[in-house]
Image (tube, helix red, strand yellow):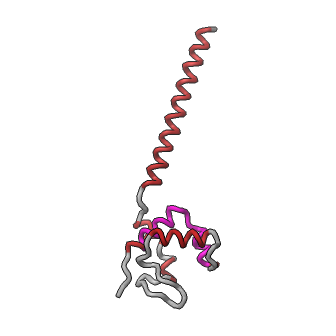
Amino acid sequence: MMKMRVKMRHLINRIHGLVIAVLATGLMVTTAAAQSPPDKAFGVFLSSQCVTCHMLSGKSVGSIPPIIGWPEAQFLTVMDSYKKKERTNALMQVVADRLNDEETAALAAYFGSLKPQK
């Protein structure tokens, strides 16, 4: 009976160690992903819908503002305000709501890296 308890305790300790290792690995992967820079190439891929209205030339069309060359922080702030419905443009609210944080950051990195045409 005593041997059985010792074996059981040993097994529980091993399982406990494995659980901690798995959780720590997941935390490291999540932290590394959160710290990695936005993917501009992914932003290029996602940008086709944006440049339908926001011209790639950086010129405004009517009341649609250019987004070329915006600082990333400004882009993220504006998109967040559409997502929270603090800005009142129904189309942009839908677009912002459909984008996750990684997609929005990639778009911000891409548009922020471009220079308006002269």
- Residue 71 is at least partly visible in this image: yes
- x then y, percent, for residue 82: 60, 73
Work out whether residue 46 or residue 27 is closer to the camera in this orientation and state it.
27
What span is in magenta? 91-111
At 38% from the left and 76% from the top, the residue drawn is 114
Say which quarter of the image contains residue 100.
bottom right
Work out whether residue 8 or residue 71 is closer to the camera in this orientation and state it.
71
Q: In the rendered view of the protein, which quadrant contains the C terminus?
A: bottom left
Give the side of residue 62 with respect to residue 32, left or right.
right
97 drawn magenta? yes
Q: Is residue 51 above or below residue 98?
A: below
At 50% from the left and 61% from the top, the residue drawn is 102
- x then y, percent, for residue 12: 58, 23
Image mark count: 0
Give the side of residue 37 with respect to residue 5, left or right.
left
Q: Is residue 3 above or below residue 39?
A: above
Say which quarter of the image contains residue 78.
bottom right
- Residue 44 is at least partly visible in this image: no
- x then y, percent, for residue 45: 45, 70
- x then y, percent, for residue 34: 47, 54
54 drawn magenta? no
Q: In the rendered view of the protein, which quadrant contains the N terminus?
A: top right
